[in-house]
Image (cartoon, rainbow, N blue to C red):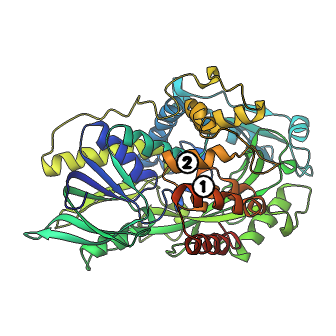
Amino acid sequence: MSNEQFDIIIIGGGATGSGIALDAASRGFKTLLLEKNDFSEGTSSRSTKMVHGGVRYLEAAVKKLDKDQFNLVKEGLKERSRLLKNAPHLCTRLTLVTPLYKWWEIPYMFTGLFLYDFISGKRGLGRTSVVSKNDMINTFPTIKKKGLVGGIKYYDGSFNDSRLNITLLQTAEKYGAICKNYSEVKSFIYTNDKISGLEMEDKITGKTYTYNSTSIINATGAFSDKVRKMDDKEAAKMLDLSSGVHIVLDKKYLPSNEGLMIPKTQDGRVLFILPWMGKCLVGTTDEKTILSEHPEVSQKDLDYILEHLEIYFDLKIDKSEILSSWSGIRPLVSAPKSSSTKSIVRDHIITSSNSGLISIIGGKWTTYRKMAEEVVDYTINKFNLSDIKCKTKELKLIGSEIQSENLKIDFVEKDIKEYLIKMYGDKALLVAQSTNKIQKLHPKYCLTNAEVLYSIKYEFVKKPLDFLVRRTSLSLIDKKASIEILEEVLTILKDALSWDEETLDNERLEALSILNKDI
């Protein structure tokens, strides 16, 4: 492939980059995507697992009569609907309830969420309703009862972020894109002061390759400014960074399949308590942070979440009960006059440098498709590429092309079948057929040996944590369990990828060093 000519090269294999790769390839452009680590290793696998229009943005839009905030909500709800249709095995409806402790909050919250429904229109997922105090207690037995007057129920979307990321890449490959993880861009190549290619190092083999392209798109999320400075040392700062911190607890703390949304904590942030993969996910965002390759959850972050759980629940959770924790960095469009990242509209900006490097700054998972469409349109106009219209609005993603419920996977246990369909959609049968003897890797979970083999062949897996953290999310819901099966996963990888003993030892040490900290 070295020195091959492409129409579009994308740097960054998270939500934005993967969406651009699919959009570009489905229009017929010769497309290459390069990611320096594993796909969705950063922010794109560390979200709150929600597909939403943004209730908080709607409140700001109404209070400030801000049209930009309103349009952001409207666009988010439109894209939410498309995601639920195009990847139904990974994106589902989520019921959320907001507990209220003052009578006047009931009409206030109801009106706001009714407006949320109204904007959704025919794309709505359910009608907002008032929940009585007794129903609140029955649904959430451990909720703080003192002063509770009731709640408001509304609906949004939930999704598996890292699996959606891989599904986008698989679909992009179907349309001819080449997608490479562990491929770090080391420098750009210029012709007459215009960017015309790049040099990339394969981090697995250590080999260096050169690729030429009509256009290059920087879609590296939190690292966008860093890549822009590779091209132009004088490039101005365009990003503000915000951390999102999450912990996972046992399902007993949220026995219902309904989640809770606390709209305003003591410092004004939003707190979500959600059902996710059979566990209880608790998280919040919008705390200013600095750029880090592997952000860690601080003791202060853990204390913050646990303290707020005690405010809203009649229970005390010990830190030893935390099954897993992680922190992700959100890339927000820079707003110098803003004192806090929660007040920044999480929209996006498309820009290009003097040399022609295109950068997409900001954005969020829910609107990845729309962002990709805009970036490719921008690239077409700037470089006079063939004016082919976007095709992703109704494009079914890999795993969603046929009714997966009708798959003949009767040779596995019922719980494994249901799990495989939920994770892989209509590819579940192909996963199950990856081995002659399908077996669970851990007695508590439906994770199987077949998935390791499938993910190596079809999902770009090269390292154990590619599988344990990002293809299956096991490490994100139960870090201890993932450590317990690490050796078996390593053995399968060693045989499939022909590792020698030194490579095996190095991969084991690297995986354990990460698993023994935050994911």
Q: Position of residue 511 (x, y in %)?
A: 63, 69
Instruction: Tell me whether circle 2 and circle 1 mark residues in contact (CB < 8 Å).
Output: yes
The amino acid on which the numbered mark 2 sits, given as a three-letter code, is Ser
The correct choice, above or below, for 236 with respect to 444 in the image is below
Question: How far is mark 2 from mark 1, CA to CA?
Answer: 7 Å
Q: Indicate which disc residue 455 carries.
A: 2
Residue at image location 91% in from the left, 36% down from the top? 134
Given residues 489 and 259, the one toward you in this image is 489
Image quadrant containing the N terminus: bottom left
Is disc 2 placed on a helix, strand or loop? Answer: helix
- Tag 1 residue: 467
Spot occupied by residue 435 in the image (x, y as percentages of width and height): 63, 40
| Residue 151 vertical placement versus 240 (above, below) | above
Q: Secondary structure at mark 1?
A: helix
**Precedes in sequence: disc 2 or disc 1:** 2
Mark 1 Cα within 10 Å, few/some/many (few <14, many 20+)?
many
Amino acid carrying mark 1 in the image: Phe
